[in-house]
Amino acid sequence: MEAGFIHPSLLLILGALLVPFLQGPLRRPYLMLVPLLALAAVILNAGQHGTFATFAFLDWQLVFGRVDKLSTVFALIMGLMAVIGTIYGLHVDRAVEHMAAWFYAAGSLGAIYAGDYLTLFLFWEMMAFASVFLIWFRRGPQSIAVGYRYLLIHTIGGVILLAGIMAVMSLPANLAQLSADELRRLLVEKDRELDWRQAKIDKLTHELAMHKRWRFGVKTEHWPVEQRQLFEETIDADLAAMEEELAQLSATPAKAKGQAKRQPLPAPRPSKTASSTSRASR
């Protein structure tokens, strides 16, 4: 973690992993200590502002700590809930239930402090699976069925969240808010896309020329009428599909090709003889 920022989710996750190794009279003080440390970390982070704990992963910039006034308010609420929930469950002897509860609280705090969509989705799924295991570890007569229903609802919610993230990521980026590295990566991606489009356009243009040659060659060959009509229909369908795809890649709508029609002749002008005759009659 960066100086001055302590992620409460890390404290809860590490604390949950150590719960099974503590037995006897040491467990209850330990159960009270870990959520209080997480709450203290939230309080210390309240004096910070900005992004912390950033890591590069493939083409992503993962931000595990985005601290502002809104995230601080919700983090304080979740930290208090973790303390209160642990006090309420001190009578529980099974260590796995405490582990699942702390993993759920860690996922909630991680989602609150998340500064990018991938980190948000990661902690969102941690919340979902931790809550499901919390239900299953209860070992009641209906725990399995209720857990599966809960998992189904959370899976639907996760898919909707992922679809929303993909929709937002597909929107054009605001260049004024991008750093130099992000602008460089965006330019590289755009260059790759342009190269792919140009290669596709060249390939379609070549295929169009080949199909037109084949169609012209059919007219010069002596084929049966039915076979020629079938071949021409197939070639025409392929040509139309390739022209449509080529128009989409070129970002210019293809003009509708119609049969050439002769324009109507203009109205005849009155001749000089007719005009002179009309004058003489006057």
Image: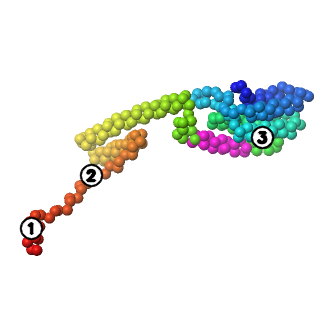
Q: Pointers 3 and 1 in contact (CB under 8 A)?
A: no
Helix or strand or loop: what does disc 3 sit on? helix
Whether residue 156 sits left or right of residue 205 in the image: it is right
Horizontal and vertical percent position of residue 70 = 71, 40
* Count of picture labels: 3
Q: Which residue is mark 1?
A: 276
Snapshot quadrant of residue 134: top right
Snapshot quadrant of residue 56: top right
Q: Is residue 191 magenta?
A: no
Q: Which one is earlier in the sequence, the residue at label 3 or at label 2?
A: 3
Q: Which residue is mark 2?
A: 260
Question: Looking at this view, is 169 or 236 the one in front?
Answer: 169
The region drawn magenta spans 149-167
Q: Pointers 2 and 1 in contact (CB under 8 A)?
A: no
Residue appearing at x 78%, y 34% in the figure: 43
Q: CA distance from mark 2 to mark 1?
A: 41 Å
Horizontal and vertical percent position of residue 114 = 67, 35
Q: Which one is earlier in the sequence, the residue at label 2 or at label 1?
A: 2
Residue 177's disc number: none
